[in-house]
Image (tube, rainbow, N blue to C red):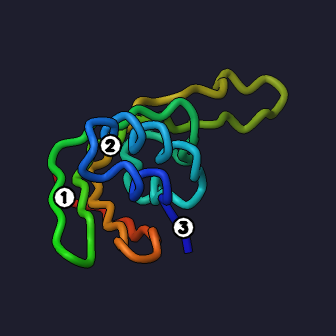
Amino acid sequence: MVALPESLKAWNRGSFDAVFKSELPRIGKALPLQEGLTSGSYALESPLDVVILQKTADDETIRVKASIFYQSLMPGCACAGDPTVEDTQNEHITMLVSINRKTAEAVFQCLED
């Protein structure tokens, strides 16, 4: 299970957005970026840009709806004489991040745009 302890500590503080945006990219492969691919075949973890769209909370959960901008790789076959080269594609996914307020465990849900 993935945890976002820094984001949990920063909730209800002016620093939450900045902390969330810096902590999310550090969890790398735990993000469901592969699910949001539309152009490439392999999601790259870096660079990753996070835009917070909405944030709410109740006694148990902090919920953050965010747009994640990243890149994917469209690899060539690397065969001799293959004119296709590895190329990156821009990708985007909207995601709901739910953070448990007691444990800081995070759950990620891909949303339809």
What mark, if any, has residue 2 been given in the picture?
3
Looking at the image, tell me whether mark 2 or mark 1 is earlier in sequence order.
2
Q: Nearer the viewer, residue 6 or 43?
A: 6
Q: Quadrant of residue 110?
A: bottom left
In space, the residues marked 2 and 1 are separated at their CA atoms by 25 Å
What mark, if any, has residue 6 been given in the picture?
none
Which of labels 2 and 3 is toward the front?
2
Specify few, some or many for label 3: CA neighbours under 10 Å numbering under 14, 14-19, or 20 or more: few
Q: Quadrant of residue 57?
A: bottom left
Residue at the spot 40% in from the left edge and 32% down from the top edge = 49
Q: Which residue is mark 2?
A: 16
Which of labels 1 and 3 is toward the front?
3
Question: What is the three-letter code of the residue carrying label 1?
Answer: Glu
Q: Quadrant of residue 91?
A: top left
Rendering coords of residue 109 (x, y %): 32, 67
Q: Secondary structure at mark 1?
A: loop
Taking the image as shown, residue 43 lies to the left or right of residue 82, namely: left
Looking at the image, tell me whether mark 1 or mark 3 is earlier in sequence order.
3
Q: Which residue is mark 1?
A: 112
Question: What is the three-letter code of the residue carrying label 2?
Answer: Phe
Looking at the image, tell me whether mark 2 or mark 3 is earlier in sequence order.
3
Specify few, some or many for label 2: CA neighbours under 10 Å numbering under 14, 14-19, or 20 or more: some
Residue at the spot 16% in from the left edge and 72% down from the top edge = 58
Q: Secondary structure at mark 2?
A: helix
Q: Is residue 102 above or below residue 36?
A: below
Q: Are marks 1 and 3 in contact (CB under 8 Å)?
A: no
